[in-house]
Amino acid sequence: MPQDGRPELDNLPDGIVIADEGRTVVDLNGTALRMLATSRDASIDAPLAEVMSLDDLEGNTWFDRTCPYDGFGLRKKLSEQSWYTSDGRELLVTARLVRAAANAAVTRVVVSLRDAHVRAFNDRERSDLVATVAHELRSPLTGVKGFTATLLSKWERFSESQKLLMLETVDSDADRLGRLITELLDAARLDSGRMRLRTEPLHPVVEIEKVLANVSAGVGRTVPAHVEGDIPMIWGDKDHFAQVFTNLVENGLVHGDGAVAITISSQVRDTGSGVEFCVDDEGSGFPQAVRGRVFTKFWHSGSSRGSGLGLYIVRGVVQAHHGTVGIEQSPSGGARVRVWLPVAEPAGLRD
């Protein structure tokens, strides 16, 4: 007889087929009916082998190949595999085997079916990742290979100044490769929840001045910092702190049309005391409709280059510090990235 709970079964996105110890189907939901191209009347009390009329690419049937009621007595689950309907649609099928005790007979088989389009979508995402990584690594690597090959084959033909210029270009491209690899590793750590912070007392103004000095030296443009009032010490990871604000300032310089500036102020929120950083540029800014997406992985604006991981990592690092980050419109009409980081002093060190 069919089990109770039909609405719950029919609301599941996956197809569900349930069979009893007699190897006959006792229930299945609407999704399974559609996937298996059958009807409820034809399926209830029918053999599971007939209802699950799926084959693999070699012509083996699902029931004969998986033997859900036979085999190893401790088996409780059938791993997910691809099986095909008579009209060639691919389904991902797994099953739970219910036993009263170890080595006891199987009393119930619960089969789950998913459309393989879900896996195809995930495969496309992985392919996009590989393509993005290959594209971003190829450009600096091509420069490194080209200049080193030229120097090795024609060393004597170049003047000392030409050699120096080529080596400086190779060094710059190597740095770019290093940054890309660091971004990929950081993104992987964020995805897996393995981002680790080594926190210590940081003075925000001092650390920001270091970041701005490094960025200014690299691009030949001065980026001012405006400090409003007394700024408290915060606890954070020095390297990741520099990574966040280097990324934000460089983004402003690359995508903005004019000056970039950063304002630092003390801000108290419901969650406690903290420091707010506003990075403003004079570019075209971000339309309201896309501001929620700019921190997603591999997001790009128009024809902009880059890995698309920078702002994704910024958000992940800020959140790891229990802070917040968002994008608004700057007073000049460009973009304003507002970052708030809590003081977050360890409880054991408070007065």
Image: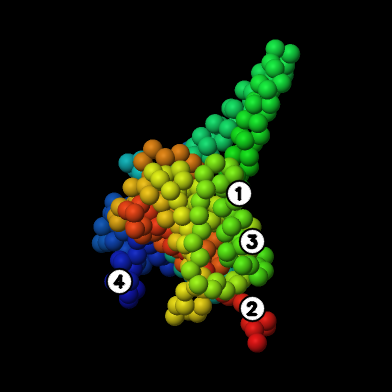
Circle on res. 6: 4
Tag 3 near tag 4, CB within 8 Å: no
The Cα–Cα distance between marks 2 and 4, rounded to whole angstroms, is: 52 Å
Q: Quick check: 345 above or below 213?
A: below
Would you say residue 137 is visible in this rendering? yes
Q: Is residue 325 found left or right of 208 in the rendered image?
A: left
Image position, residue 132 (x, y; %)? 49, 39
Residue where numbered disc 2 is placed: 346
Crowding at dot 4, Cα within 10 Å, few <14 / some 14-19 / many 20+, comes out as few
Badge nearest the viewer, 2 or 4: 2
Relative depth, front residue between 321 and 201: 201
Q: Residue furthest bottom?
A: 351
State if disc 1 and disc 2 touch (CB < 8 Å): no
Which quadrant does the N terminus fall into? bottom left
Q: Are marks 1 and 4 in contact (CB under 8 Å)?
A: no
Spatial CA distance of label 3 from label 4 is 55 Å
Task: State the SS at label 1.
Answer: helix
Q: Amino acid at mark 4?
A: Arg
Residue placed under numbered mark 1 in the picture? 214
Up the image or down, 50 lies above or below 233; here it is above
Q: Nearer the viewer, residue 149 or 328?
A: 328
Secondary structure of residue under mark 2: loop
Dots 1 and 3: beta carbons under 8 Å? no
Sequence-wise, the earlier of marks 2 and 3 is 3
Label 2 or label 3, whichever lies nearer to me, is 3
Give residue 33's position: percent from left, percent from top: 30, 57
Residue at 52% over, 48% down: 222
Q: Where residue 238 is drawn, which disc sits there?
A: 3
